[in-house]
Image (cartoon, helix red, strand yellow):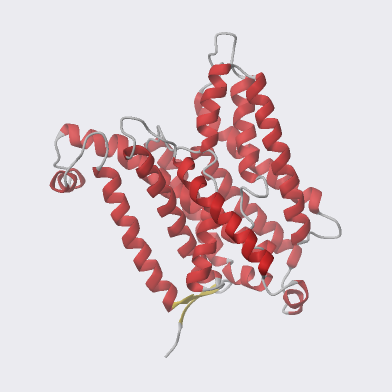
Amino acid sequence: MRKYISFRTNRFSFFLDKKGLGYFSLFFLVALIIAYLSVSLGEYIVYPSDVFQVLMGNGEKMHSFIITTLRLPRLLVALFVGIGLATSGAILQGMIRNPLASPDIIGITGGGSFAVVMFLTIFSDKSDSLSVSIHWQPVAAFLGAMIIGLLVYILAYQDGVSPIRIILIGIGLSTLTQALTTLGMILGPIYRASQANIWLTGSVYGANWDHVNIIAPVILVLVTISLLIARRINVQELGDDLAAGVGSHLQRDRLLFLIISTALAGVAVSFAGGVGFVGLMAPHIARRLVGSSYGALIPISALIGGILVMGADLIGRTAFLPLEVPAGVFTASIGAPYFIYLLFRSKRS
């Protein structure tokens, strides 16, 4: 009995492990349950029958406003942020051949955070008002993340780009952006520093349908591209000599992987801030479940990432009512110990 389902086109192909399909179905069900809880629970509880009526277009005005205007766009932004960060982390781990790699570790998230702090500092006047629209903030975050990704590639390039140089340069740039971000918050207006601190922690508070209309198609397109190049990522994990021996264009592929992973993380960071460790945890959990084949690893990682961010936002929004805790607090509280565990495990092995 065949263990794989193959998908082929003229130029692309990938294999999906049937076990991966089972896990995908399981996590999809978990995501649906969290989605239902997210639109139902909060300071005002909407009961199942009312949720169904709203989704059918027949709900009461108040219920419709709560679900369709406040909770549903926030849920969808959290989902796509998690998908973007997790897929970015999966690609980086395959390219660098290191399970500790993630957008946080190599500075992509830090680049977006630094750009936002600079945006809030530079464009704040003496009355603490912004001189430009706040809608430019996600643009600043995306550009900051992309610039750091480009710098990682340029500084790591020396007769080609090696995985070890990418991660070392990335760690250095991550440390630098963290220091500059702290400096910007100290020198900037106090009110903006407080606002930036909430964003740096990672939150989808204030998400609306305009955000969904931007993040959803971009993330879906980038994840689709990631699936189409999954076999190339598999080849990278063989090592440079074997990959070159089977005809892989190592340097061209690494540049492509870095661009896609940086774009995925940059889009996610631009709408939710520094939601930490999702890009580390989700691919690692998926790898332990379905192995290293990226035809299964990418979609499973994406779903786990979406579940992590949706779940963290749900807990932060409901556990401490009437207060809200940013989702990034919960992902970091799980991710930091998990990162330490991975360090000790890799040291022992």
Place of residue 210 in the rendered image (x, y in percent of width and height, measured from the top left): 41, 36
The answer to which of 195 and 265 lies nearer the viewer is 195
Position above or below: 64 against 346: above
Identity of the residue drawn at 44% across and 73% down: 20
Place of residue 148 in the rendered image (x, y in percent of width and height, measured from the top left): 69, 43
The answer to which of 79 and 282 lies nearer the viewer is 282
Position above or below: 9 against 298: below
The answer to which of 101 and 265 lies nearer the viewer is 101
Work out which quarter of the rendered image holds the N terminus and state it: bottom left
Identity of the residue drawn at 50% across and 28% down: 135
**Residue found at the very far bottom of the displayed protein:** 1
Identity of the residue drawn at 74% across and 78% down: 242
Work out which quarter of the rendered image holds the C terminus and state it: bottom right
Give the mark count.
0
Identity of the residue drawn at 51% across and 22% down: 133
Place of residue 15 in the rendered image (x, y in percent of width and height, measured from the top left): 51, 76
Position above or below: 93 against 10: above
Residue 244 visible, this orientation: yes
The answer to which of 92 and 60 lies nearer the viewer is 92
Residue 70 quadrant:
top left
Residue 9 visible, this orientation: no
Residue 111 quadrant:
top right
Position above or below: 148 against 4: above
Q: Is residue 74 left or right of residue 329?
A: left
**Residue found at the very far right of the displayed protein:** 159
Place of residue 24 in the rendered image (x, y in percent of width and height, measured from the top left): 40, 67
